[in-house]
Amino acid sequence: MTWLRRAGIALVVLLVLGGAAYWYYVADGAVPAQTSYKTDIAGWRQLVSGDTSQSPNEIRIEFVGRDTMPFIAVQGGGASKDFARTRASFQLNGPAGSVIIDSTMDKEIAAKAQRGDGATFDEAAYGRVISAMGVAAHVAVTHEHIDHIGGVLRFPSPERLAERLVLTKQQFEGLEHSKGIAIPPAYAAMAHLDLTAPTRIAPGVVMIPAPGHSPGSAMFYVRLADGHEVLFLGDVAWAISNVRTPAMRPRFVEQFFMAPENRAEVGDEIRALYDLSKAEPGLVMIPAHDDAYIGELITSGLIKPQFVIDGP
Ligand SMILES: [Zn+2]
């Protein structure tokens, strides 16, 4: 065999290996055909069936931070384009008081967590999130990652928040991964909800265990007083296209750019959400970080910009 022929074979082997690695780490977004994850919407509805007059009547949002990431890091096999990532907090308002879902993070944490020169942080919006948490009936987070729970950890008077904070056992135990941010003693001392089944946490609001992205990941089913139904996905999906395609995050992101997630569990959840979206087209799913899609939901009137801060 000539050296040229050997070099040629070596090149082909490298290309095949490289192609396989590229497929495995970047291009494979396939979700399983079957799922063991249960999206029991009939059960969720049942849990809040008696709440009609006490249910939330509006959803509000604060955009605290924004940055961009390549869409190929959001979705395996996704197009080569930028994905605008929002860092948002949601406020559900109604006669029973308000429920805050996700607390975002303060400026200092954001400076480390957000990426790129174009990253922005809205100090006034974060101030409104903290003020709203101060008077909310309940504060909960979709999971224990720092861009969602940072505002809880940095809340100025944790002992005042603890009595209204819904922190699950799974989220508290997962907190050790939260990058060295101190955990206030009040959150260690409080009762932690052992979230192993969908649980009503407030009128019209059901917290649903969805471990995978993190051990404490959860979704929130909300039935508004007017009958609209919403499912907050947290980071089970970063973009609505993860559900609509359906397609998962690529492995290179799961393994090298975040606290490693359980791909099998997330895959089951994405499949289940895709199936649920076909069965229940009226149910609006809200991924935590999809700036463009959340913008559409504001335009449609489902979500209103800016929190209102009323006394309890
Ligand atoms: Zn997140």
Image (cartoon, helix red, strand yellow):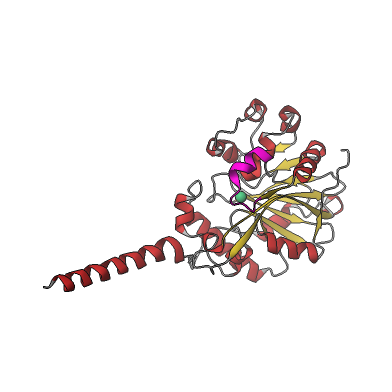
On screen, residue 231 above or below 100: below
Magenta region: which residues? 106-119
Q: Give the residue at x 61% y 51%.
A: 117
Q: Locate the N terminus by quadrant.
A: bottom left
- In which image quadrant can residue 272 be found? bottom right
Viewer-nearest residue: 78 or 117 = 117
Viewer-nearest residue: 140 or 9 = 9
On screen, residue 58 above or below 28: above
| Left or right side of 125 for 38 | left
Q: Residue 17: x percent and y percent?
A: 31, 65
Q: Give the residue at x 60% y 53%.
A: 235
Q: Residue 299: x percent and y percent?
A: 80, 65
- Residue 118 magenta: yes
Q: Locate the C terminus by quadrant.
A: top right
Q: Residue 121: x percent and y percent?
A: 70, 47
Q: Is residue 87 visible?
A: yes
| Left or right side of 68 for 134 | right
Instruction: Count numbered badges in the picture.
Output: 0
- Residue 13 magenta: no
